[in-house]
Amino acid sequence: MAEYITYVVYMTYDLHGQWDYGSEWSTPGCSTGSSCLRSHVNITETVNALSMITKAGMPSYKIIVGITSYGRSFKMTTKGCTGPMCKFTGPSSGAAPGKCTGTAGYLADAEIKDMISRGGNIQESYDSASSSDILVYDNTEWVAYMKKSTRDARSLVYKDYSMGGTVNWAIDLEDTVPLSPAGVVGIGTTFVQHISPAKATVIPYSETTVKATATFTLQP
């Protein structure tokens, strides 16, 4: 296949998630057998995956490596636990959903930044072993993600491996944006559908304060 394609997007994220619960094969190094907290963008597992596809014959310059602007979150079983043996609850996710994404186990970077900016009961750290940023908030809410500095550092690593570049899922998850003159703010998960040279319709991808029928005048 490598001979006939220009490039392949290799989605090196979602390596871990709530689906790991109860699986003894999905959490390497988990001495209790399963359900240990792991970063979904673990650098070691990413490099192992890149090794497999290149050994299979795909030229590295044709591989576009995935990076993320979201985090995978979990509900910790034990308050204050640190280290690779900490576990998460299940089988269904007990993680708090984001106010915009609204999905347990998934938080946009914009939501993570908002929680950090508000302060309070939060603990930030960087896990060098997985090359991931970690946030613990409200005692038992745990999320692994990538700050911009981490994404930039990853991009340099992949450049050193002669990869073709990176692709981000997804840039509209990075920041909140003003959605109305009144200053209403929502996550950047809206699709703008042009209906004329002068007007467009805003179609929210997720729950926001913007109505799907809202139109606005485009500035030249």
Image (spheres, rainbow, N blue to C red):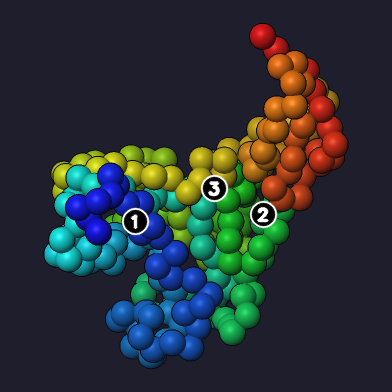
Q: Nearer the viewer, mark 1 or mark 2?
A: 1
Where residue 92 sits, quadrant-wise, is bottom right
Residues packed near mark 1 inside 10 Å, few (<14), some (14 to 19) or many (20 plus): some
Q: Amino acid at mark 1?
A: Tyr
Whether residue 116 appears in this view of the structure is no
Query: Which residue type carries mark 3?
Result: Asp
**Which quadrant would residue 129 be assigned to in this image?**
bottom left
Name which of mark 3 and mark 2 comes first in the sequence.
2
The image shows residue 119, relative to residue 75, as above or below, that is above
Q: Which residue is mark 2?
A: 101
User: What residue did someone put label 1 on?
Assistant: 10
Disc 2 residue type (three-letter)? Thr
Mark 3 or 2, closer to the camera: 2
Image quadrant in which you'd find residue 101: bottom right
Asked if residue 190 lies left or right of residue 83, the reply is right
Q: Residues within 10 Å of mark 2 (few under 14, many from 20)?
A: some
**Image: 109 above or below 135:** above
Mark pair 3, 1: CA separation: 21 Å
Tell me the element at label 2: loop
- Asked whether disc 3 touches disc 1, contact meaning CB atoms under 8 Å apart, the reply is no
Read off the residue under disc 3. Answer: 109
Disc 3 residue crowd, few under 14, some 14–19, many 20+, Cα 10 Å: many
Q: Which of marks 1 and 3 precedes in the sequence?
A: 1
Q: Position of residue 180 (x, y in %)?
A: 79, 27
